[in-house]
Amino acid sequence: MKLVLASDNRHKLEEFRVLFTSLDVELISKAEAGFTDEVEENGSTFAENAFIKAEAVMRATGLPAVADDSGLCVDALGGEPGVYSARYTGSHDASDRDRYELVLKKLGDRTDRSARFVCSLCCVFPNEDVLRAEGVCEGSILFAPRGEHGFGYDPVFSPVGKDCSMAELTMEEKNAISHRGRALKEFRKVWEQYYADK
């Protein structure tokens, strides 16, 4: 069965393919499915944005589509960057470094650095059935970036129970505790239940 990931982010596609290995699906990017448009993410929550993306790609391709909307929520910044994590600087041309440096600048030398990564997953089928799951990874913001792996805000985020940044973990270690890994674990249960009920 072909399943379209409503993203062309190469890093995200690699992560999802690893996490989807136990499901009997061929995961392809939206570009591989022939969908090249940008979907406007105008939802106010991660869950709304995930649904908007998955539904748009499903309608355009006729294939089941799965989307995630994920981001970093920093308590001392009132939950920012939140749903604006990918466009926090206001520019789509900004780099990951630009975005996490803005977080570090806004936090300054505050000691309350608690934060979490949140991932909402949504799968929309051509028959309009919808599957949803969510995962959260609690942690804190470091004072400076560390590590070469991962992407996004990984270099400045230290997961609870780890004395390192997310960018210092191997892919296997990251998938075991990440918001996306946890959402996928939950999604797998929802997916299996969905097919068991058919």
Image: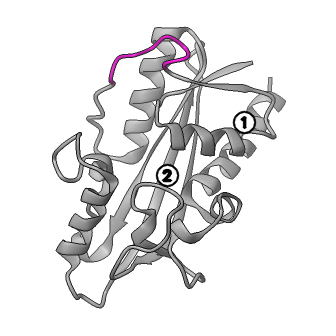
In-image side of 3 versus 76 (left or right) = right
Residue at x-position 70% and y-position 51%: 185
Which is nearer the eye, 30 or 66?
30
Q: Separation of disc 1 and disc 2 at Cα?
A: 17 Å
Against 78, residue 97 (above or below) is above
Which quadrant of the view contains residue 4? top right
- Neighbour tally class for label 1: few under 14, some 14-19, many 20 plus, Cα within 10 Å: some
Q: Magenta stretch?
A: 31-38
Magenta residues, dominant SS class: loop
The three-letter code of the residue at mark 2 reads: Cys
Against 150, residue 167 (above or below) is below
Against 16, residue 40 (above or below) is above
In-image side of 115 versus 40 (left or right) = right
Where's residue 57, x and y in %? 46, 19
Q: Which residue is mark 1?
A: 191
- Of the numbered discs in the image, which one, if any, rests on residue 119? 2
Task: Give the quarter of the figure containing the N terminus.
Answer: top right
- Please tell me which of labels 1 and 2 falls first in the chain: 2
Where's residue 52, x and y in %? 39, 29
Q: Which type of secondary structure does the marked residue at label 2 adopt?
A: strand
Q: Residue furthest front?
A: 148
Q: Which type of secondary structure does the marked residue at label 1 adopt?
A: helix
Q: Is residue 28 magenta?
A: no
Where's residue 180, x and y in %? 57, 52
The three-letter code of the residue at mark 1 reads: Trp
Residue at x-position 21% and y-position 65%: 102
